[in-house]
Structures are given as C-alpha cells and as structure tokens.
Amino acid sequence: MGRKEDNIKKAQAIMTQLPQIRNIGTAAHIDHGKTTLSDNLIAGAGMMSEELAGKQLMLDFDEQEQARGITINSAAASMVHEVEGKDFLINLIDTPGHVDFGGDVTRAMRAIDGVIIVACAVEGVMPQTETVIRQALREKVKPILAINKVDRLINELKVTPEQMQERFVKIITQVNELIIKMVPEEFKGEWKVNPANGTVIFCSAYHNWAISVPYMQRTGITFKDIYDFCANEDQKTLAKKAPLHEVTLDSVIEHLPPPDEAQKYRIPHIWHGDAESELGKHMINTDKDGPTMFMVTKIVIDPHAGEIATGRLYSGTIRRGHELFVIGMPGKNRTQQVGVFVGGDRINIEEVIAGNIIAVSGLKSAISGSTVTSEEDVEGFEKITHVSEPVVTVSVEAKHTKDLPKLVEVLHSVAKADPSLVVEINHETGEHLLSGMGELHLEITEYRIVNEWGVDIKTSPPIVVYREGLEKHAGPFEGKSPNKHNRFYFKVQPLEEEFIKAIKDGDIPDGKIKNSKEHARLLQDLGMEKEMAKGLYAVNGTCMLLNATKGIQYLHETKELIIDAFNEVVKMGPLAREPLIGAKVMLVDAKLHEDSIHRGPGQIIPAVRNGIYGAIVTAKSTLMEPKMMVYVNVPQDVMGNVTREMQQRRGTVEDMTSEGDMTTIISKTPVAEMFGFAGSIRSATQGRALWSTEFSGFDRVPHELQDKVVREIRERKGLKPEPPTADYYQA
C-alpha cells in the first residue's frame, strides 16, 4: 500500500513537468487483451497487486463489465514509471473494443497524444483494429503496436519459431499498410511501426511479460528464449526477466510524444480558431498561465460527487472553486473538486495545469464534447465526429407513474454521459425513445437505468432507425406561406460523394456557416462553382442548404428562419419521418412581402418546409437502411451453416478467406435482420464461431420491400399509412 501512496505523491509532483508526461490510450478489436495489458501496466507501476493484475481487470470496475468480460466504459488511470533515474507520469485511458461502444474510443482519442494498438497474435488484424487505427490517426494520435497473446501462438497453435516470425511480419505489415493509408500527410514516413526501434512490442499481457528488439539487445534475451519459456510453460520466469510494464512503458516514453510537443500539431487540427491569436498560442505552447481551455471527453456519474467531467486540459490551470463557462450554455459553473483517476479511485488535488488528463466536478452544464473555458466568447474545440451512428431504438416507459419525473431526469443524465446515445422525449405521446449503436449498447443502458439509477422501466422490442435519401434531381418546387404573400422555390438533388466524404472527415464543418469565405473556398476546391459555393447557408449531417438566388429583397432578413425550416426537414423526411441524408437543397428563387409583419416564423417556416418537402417527394425519396459488416470466423465443416444463416438475413457474402482449417466469412447484412443473431449463430455452429460486426453505412431498402417497410414505420408513428404526394405540399 505504501508504494501506491508514494506513487500518488510522485504523480502530483510530475504533473507540472510537461516533458515527463505522456497521455496515452489502449485500443484494439474486442478480446485482444487491452484491459489485461492496462491492468498489468498499472500493477507494474505499483498501483495494484501484481497477483490480481489481468485477473481483477481493475479498469473494468463496472459490474456489467465484469459480468460480461468486456470493457464498456473507457477508464482513466495515472501511474509513474522510472527510466534511467527519471520519473515519468503516464495518464492512460483503456478503451472498449466492442463496436457498440466505438463512440467511447473516438472521444478518448481527443484526450490523448499516443496510443498502444493491441493486436492478437492468433487472430491478427481484425475489422475493429482497422477502425481504431483510423480513429487514432484522424485525431493525430501517434500509434505504437503491441502484439499480444504470443504464448497462445506457441502453446495452442504449436507454430514453429519460423512460422511465429512469419505471423509477426504479416501483422506488422498489415498495420503499417493501414497507417500509410490513413496517416496525416506530415507524418507519412515517421509514424510507421518498426520492431527495430521498439515501436513494436511482443507480449502476453495475461502472463505479464513483454519483449522488444531494443530490450533484447540490452538484456541478451532472444526470440528463441521466448519460444522455449512458453513451450516449457515457465512464463513466470520470463515475466521476471522481461516485465510487461517495463518494456511497454519504456517504449511509450521513448516513442510517444509529451503534451507540449503533441499540442503543437494537434491544436490546429482539433481547434479551428486563429492559431496566431493569443489563445491559439497559449494552447499550442501548453501554457499553464493562459486562459483555461478544457475539452470534456467523458461524463462519469459518481453516486457521491455527482457528475464528473473527465477530459484534457489544453491551456491554463484549473483550481477548486474556479468559475468557468461551458461554450454554448448560459451562466457560469463553479468547479467543486479537481482530481485524477487511478483505476476506480479518484484522487482529489488542489490544482492541475495544462497538458494533463483530469477529472472535474461541478461543471453541471458540460456534456461529452463540451469546451470549458475561463473566457466567455471564444471558439470551442471541433465537434467530435463518430465513426458509427445510432441505428437501433427502443421506447422506454416508467413501470410506475410516480417514477416518470425521475425517468426524464435519468434519461438526460444518460445522454450526457454517453453522447453516442440519442434520447428523444415526445411530449405529445409521452413516449421516451432511446437510440444506440446496437442491441448490446441499449441493453447495457437499460441495465444501468434500473440498477444504478433505481428506476423500473419497460422497454419495447428494439426497432431500426432508417434514413431517407433522394433518387434524382427535382424542382423548382413552390412553397407558399399560409397567408400566400411569400413564395420560395427549391431544387433538390443527391449530394455528390466528394462533399459527403468531406463532411464525414470533418473538412466541412457541420452546422451554421460562421466563416463563409473559408467554406466557399473548401467547396470550390471540391469542384463546386464559385457563385454556388458563396451561397452556402448551412450543413446538417450530410445535407447541404445553398442559396442560389440573386438580388432578392428582404431575403437576408429571413435567412435564420429558412435554416430552421431546413433543419426540421433534415430531422424528419417526408417519406417516413426518418432523418434525411445525402441531400443538396438549393433555394433558386423567392418572392417576399415587403412588410416584415407578414414575414414572421409562422409564415416563412411552413413555406420553406413545404417547398423542400415537395421537391424531395418529386425527386422520389427512398428509404435507406443501416447495414453491418459481419465477420464470422469458423471451422470449415460448419461454413455452409454460416453462409445459409447470413443469406436468410438478407446478407450478401462479400469475401471469404481461409487459414489452416478456419475460414473467415465477411458479409454485409441489414441491421433490421441482425436481432437475435448471437443465439442463431451459436446454434448453427455448435458454439464454434467467433464473430464481430462493424457499422458500414446506409444502403437503399430493396425496391420490393420499401412500401411495406414505409407503411409499418408510418403506422408505428401514428401517421397515415400512405406517404404524402407532391400535391399535398402545394396547398
């Protein structure tokens, strides 16, 4: 216990020495051993018992995580590691591997500067490995690679030393191919992983040993020794000769950047204010005396202290009792406690300076993704863009009427803590809708509402969230205001693929247009005509609103109302009241009453809405369904059962690869057909299948099914079964 307390004291002392801090994470495909690795790093640093490390799963301190054996929440922990007589502070975030919790990984990447990508030596590079590498590089987070479960390769697959080396080369090559493909231009040659310099670690997190080429050169241990220790089942001796924490943390300290170095290239990427401004310079220089700029990446609910905002402090110092603003929210928030996480414990301290990952209580207005600052009017950090979208919804009701007010409060807290969840409270029907990334995501959330918040709930069977898209061009379509004094003419067409990609990559920011010249330049670079690009009004999801008119009197006075109506249409399309995607909406003409009293919201919004809806219906809107890439790894003798199972679920087999007697079947399957898949695949393969999924976007619902599905959705929402025609919007 003394060692832990000693380390906490050391950690507090190093917090002010930026070159001696590393903010890192672990990320990988599910079950590749991230949490076991993180546990052993913490144990090695003296923060928990070494016997329990890897078995206790200290960072899976949530009861559901321990019951299911998976990581659900990203968990933060700080530890101290010594290299050549110098102490370093390592702030570590352990992230989930299950695709349903990918949002947590994306948010964690915003707080860290370096990441250990963990890949299983037996399974190799898997779909989620590719996703987490993409998530890291998109945030300019530098990777190193840990090839885990090497002992299983030797003891279970009985590979020879030569085959082992071949397997390693294959994994390293695949990881480097992904890095080369996705790495930011400025780090093209630098960020590849290379065993020779120690950016690749070979380990068994469960048995607590690791090795790297520099460590071999220093100690004389060879790959042959590793092979012999594993084959002779003497991994305890190996763990003493090559301790996991020492080898891994040495590599982290040598190859991953300290905050003062990383913020120089990360700030211009995650904050789009003026880098030459005073605030920009304070953040780029990680200045403890600058204004406070704190990015919240997670809200943790503590039963005693309430909401704890965890995230990265990029500039300034946060002390207890500080008054801070949350950008976009009214009023000030007063900080109550400031601290750091050590596994499940939160250690409170008086103040923390820029460059650290910290936990702050008292920021009541903050949600994950908020910018917290000491200045009132400043540019916030860039919105965190998620790889996946909520595609499954359940309706939630309180079992007892007395719990209804509490349920509303709890749902707001749940959405605050996990922005990958979307909570919609329909005040007309009294229905509460909860949308998440998948069945498991919603199951866990329901469990928490009942067990952690103490509200008994009833939920509907899960339903799929569809999207609406366009088939072709249409318009101009006239939308008239109820008083007939204002008319708007709209054209619509599917938005070109290059613009959709730029929005998804964050190159074209979502929301109202703040810097119109900058946006116009971006659109022109992507091939839009200059005049059209200058008229960009708003971007919502993958939909764009453009003003293509010239010299219309009073139009600028109605601009905000036009944008509001456009946002309403994007939220609920005409076909089934599902969100609209991939649409380019152009205002091509307008006739407005000269008297502003006849141009109020009650006139302009319905006119614009009807004009856009009418154009969409004329352009033939289509229903788009979410799809999953399903990866199933099975012995060849049950391969037929798997392909049959996928085909019954409207899945199309995209690829098949074989290695030894195992086959990996990759298919693209609608989310609507994936309910109950876990049980079916288990019985179809007698439990011999390993499978995982990855969100792969939206595709059109087959033509023959569209009318039936649209009718079902409309009836469920209490609408007329038949969608409206263009005539309906011409009134």
Image (cartoon, helix red, strand yellow):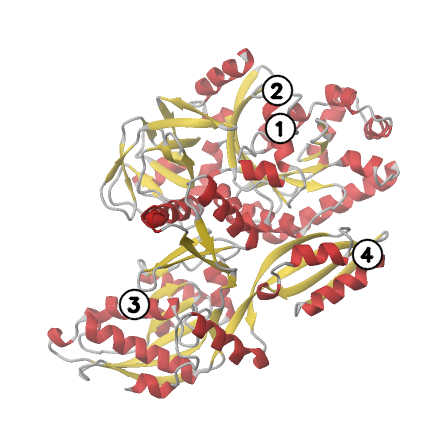
The residue under label 3 is which amino acid type? Ile
- The residues tagged by marks 1 and 3 sit, at their Cα atoms, a distance apart of 53 Å
- Nearest to the eye among marks 4 and 1: give it: 1
Q: Which residue is mark 3?
A: 563
Task: Write the residue at 35% across / 47% down.
Answer: 403
The residue under label 4 is which amino acid type? Ser
Foreground: 626 or 381? 626
- Nearest to the eye among marks 1 and 3: give it: 1
- Nearest to the eye among marks 2 and 1: give it: 1
Task: Write the residue at 42% across / 41% down.
Answer: 454
The residue under label 2 is which amino acid type? Ser
In this view, 26 is above or below 507:
above
Sequence order check: which comes first, mark 1 or mark 3?
1
Q: Which residue is mark 2?
A: 49
Secondary structure of the residue carrying numbered label 2: loop
Sequence order check: which comes first, mark 2 or mark 1?
2
The residue under label 1 is which amino acid type? Gln
- The residues tagged by marks 2 and 3 sit, at their Cα atoms, a distance apart of 58 Å
- The residues tagged by marks 3 and 4 sit, at their Cα atoms, a distance apart of 52 Å
Q: Which residue is mark 4?
A: 658
Crowd band around label 1 with a 10 angstrom C-alpha radius: few (<14), some (14–19), many (20+): some
In this view, 383 is above or below 698:
above
Left or right for 266, reference 123: left
Secondary structure of the residue carrying numbered label 1: loop
- The residues tagged by marks 4 and 1 sit, at their Cα atoms, a distance apart of 36 Å
